[in-house]
Image: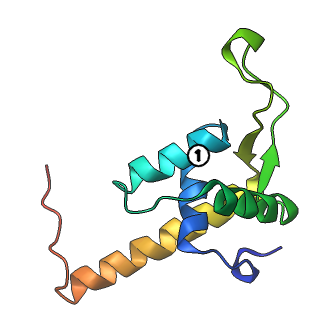
Amino acid sequence: MPESQFSLTPAMFQVLLALGDEEKHGYAILKDVEEQTDGHVRLSTGTLYAMIKRLLVEGVLKECRNRPPADEDDQRRRYYRLTPLGREIAVGEAERMEKLIATARDKHLLRRLRPA
């Protein structure tokens, strides 16, 4: 499925961002989204798992078979990771947003970053 045919909501993008660096279980995804948005996005478990279900069906996420050692894990947890398609979609969205930010700077809506 080409990236342009996939409808990505802002909340879905947050989930993809949460999974960008490593596989996580649902509760860790919820916490990561809340943290990376400074609490502005708080997903309910029902919303998250409905999203995960859709992302699994669409081939954007995959359930992981690798699990932490049993003494460090709750066997009820399911772990998820981005598929290559999921990473492609996340990168495409991030690049789209980067272009929007550049345009906002060109239009003097945002300040230009100063070199460090």
Which of 68 and 50 lies nearest the eye of the viewer?
50
Amino acid type, callout 1: Ile
Quarter residue 55 falls in? bottom right
- Horizontal side of 114 relative to 29 (left or right) equals left
Q: Residue at x 50, y 44 (%)?
A: 31
Residue visible at 85% across and 31% down in the picture? 65
* Marker count (numbered): 1
In the rendered image, the vertical position of residue 33 relative to residue 98, given as above or below: above
Query: Which colour scheme appears in the figure?
Result: rainbow
Residue 111 shows up from this direction: yes
Q: Position of residue 77 (x, y in %)?
A: 75, 33
- In the rendered view, tell whether residue 88 sits above or below residue 107: above
Residue 110, placed above or below residue 114: below
44, 98: nearer the viewer: 44
Residue 88 image-quadrant placement: bottom right
Residue drawn where x is 14% and y is 74% of the image: 111
Task: Report the residue that reaches farthest toward the top.
Answer: 71
Q: Label 1: few (<14), some or many (≥20) within 10 Å?
A: many
Residue 87: x, y in percent? 66, 56
Measured along the vertical axis of the image, is residue 61 above or below residue 76? below
Q: Is residue 76 left or right of residue 48?
A: right
Residue 20 is at least partly visible in this image? no
Could you tell me which secondary element the residue under label 1 belongs to? Answer: helix
Left or right of 115 in this view: 35: right
Which residue is at the front of the view, 13 or 90? 13
Q: On the image, numbered disc 1 is attached to which residue?
A: 29
Quarter occupied by the N terminus = bottom right
Q: Is residue 62 left or right of residue 72?
A: right
Residue 20 on image: x %, y %: 58, 47
Q: Which residue is depicted at the point 71% across and 20% down? A: 73
